[in-house]
DNA sequence: TCTGTAATGTTATAATGTAACATTATTTGG
DNA sequence: CCAAATAATGTTACATTATAACATTACAGA
């Protein structure tokens, strides 16, 4: 089954982001329920902080915010929660930014392709079978067995291009 | 003009690496000559250290080696040289490893696609117009203007797969 | 040779990430 | 329910990666 999904499109700066957050938390809860995993208050809080916008969030920014309301937080607190969330596909790490974004599609494991706007900082995620398949095909030609693909594209989103800049 | 180049293939562990190094330095000198840039002894030394193998090299490993023979080296020494080399396309940074690999094709600007073997650590680089083009095509569909592409693929190279493991 | 710019030196510190062990919470088998 | 095992979090310390800011030296062009 071939799929070319837009997991997370660019959204106008004016969109109702609360809805993104709410549905992401709901999906995360469902995913953990089904998988018998514990979305503890701490993990949920970190997930909410990652989902505070469509811009990738830095671990230490999460930490700073987490401390307000959870004073015992330290770097391992955040990194452990982020590790858990990544393993569950609830967040992705953007390697080129050392930062994290939420994923709205934890059900299917995928590595995704990320498009990062240099102006507004927003990230869109695709899970595109054409890109994925082509990379595998090219790898196969020289006997390389792919297990993980990182595709991070910098550029300028439609909205930012339209608004002059 | 469409090009699907293998900039740097996987090479057997037994290959004559001295030749890779020699030709990379030669190409770098030529590139700097033509561009009117200075491949200073320091920069050349850093380039040699990056080219010491086909495994990505860490900045602080370069630094440690640089110090032997150039005791005044400090982090900025290395990062400045690496910045210069990156700008000139003489090395690429592998974002997912925070490490650097040499590029044998400084003449044409490109971002490349990197295939990283989890066993031997070697990296192969393609500059594949199909992958590149497909990513741009997909981006165009939602009005995204690409300026830089990061493609880093983890997996297992032919040689490592053959040798059991 | 003078002079501006590029390159390097030097010190300090910021930003990112992990190791190791202690404590607390939760689950599970009796 | 209780005890033991396991999972999650707390805590301290440190390792790794990267940059800021300013001083000095080398070099190219007038
Ligand atoms: Zn939103
Ligand atoms: Zn934008
Ligand atoms: Zn070689
Ligand atoms: Zn290998």
Image (spheres, coloured by chain):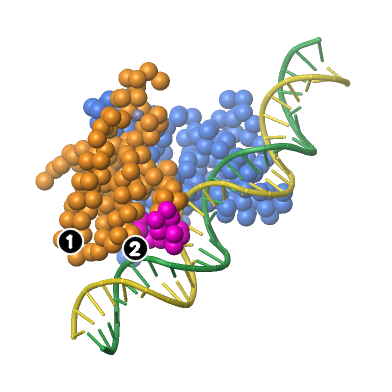
Chain colours: A blue, B orange, C green, D yellow
Q: Does the stretch in magenta take in A86?
A: no
Task: Indicate whether A41 appears above or below A3.
Answer: below
- Residue B33 is marked as 1
A23 left or right of B13 in image: right
Comparing marks 1 and 2, which lies closer to the viewer? 1
Task: Indicate whether B104 appears above or below B45.
Answer: above
Q: In which quarter of the image is residue B154?
A: top left
Q: Do the residues labelled 1 and 2 touch (CB within 8 Å)?
A: no
Q: How crowded is mark 1: few (under 14 residues within 10 Å), some or many (20 or more)?
A: few
Q: Does the stretch in magenta take in B76?
A: yes
Q: Give the range drawn in magenta.
A: B67-85
Which residue is located at x 63 percent, y 54 percent?
A65
Locate residue D17, reporting x and y percent: 47, 50
On the same chain, marks 1 and 2? The answer is no
Instruction: Depth check: give the residue in front, A133 or B17.
Output: B17
B8 left or right of B65 in image: left
Instruction: Depth check: give the residue in front, B134 or B24.
Output: B24
Locate residue A87, reporting x and y percent: 53, 33
Q: In which quarter of the image is the C terminus of chain A?
A: bottom left
Q: How many labels does the image show?
A: 2
Q: How crowded is mark 2: few (under 14 residues within 10 Å), some or many (20 or more)?
A: few
Which residue is located at x 26 percent, y 53 percent?
B89
- Residue A60 is marked as none
Q: Which chain carries label 1?
A: B
Residue A139 in view in this figure:
no
Q: Is the magenta stretch mostly helix, strand or loop?
A: helix
Q: Is mark 2 on a helix, strand or loop?
A: loop
Residue on which disc 2 sits? A163
Locate residue B23, reporting x and y percent: 20, 46
């Amino acid at each position: 089954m071939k799929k070319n999904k837009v997991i997370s499109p660019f959204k106008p700066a004016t969109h109702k982001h609360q809805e993104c957050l709410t549905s992401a938390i709901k999906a995360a809860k469902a995913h953990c329920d089904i998988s018998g995993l514990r979305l503890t208050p701490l993990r949920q809080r970190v997930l909410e902080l990652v989902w505070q916008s469509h811009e990738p969030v830095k671990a230490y920014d999460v930490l700073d915010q987490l401390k307000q309301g959870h004073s015992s937080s330290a770097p391992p607190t955040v990194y452990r929660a982020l590790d858990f969330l990544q393993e569950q596909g609830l967040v992705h790490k953007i390697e080129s930014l050392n930062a994290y974004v939420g994923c709205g599609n934890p059900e299917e494991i995928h590595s995704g392709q990320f498009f990062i706007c240099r102006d507004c900082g927003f990230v869109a995620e695709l899970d595109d079978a054409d890109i994925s398949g082509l990379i595998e095909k090219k790898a196969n030609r020289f006997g390389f067995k792919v297990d993980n693909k990182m595709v991070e594209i910098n550029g300028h989103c439609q909205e930012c291009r339209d608004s002059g800049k």
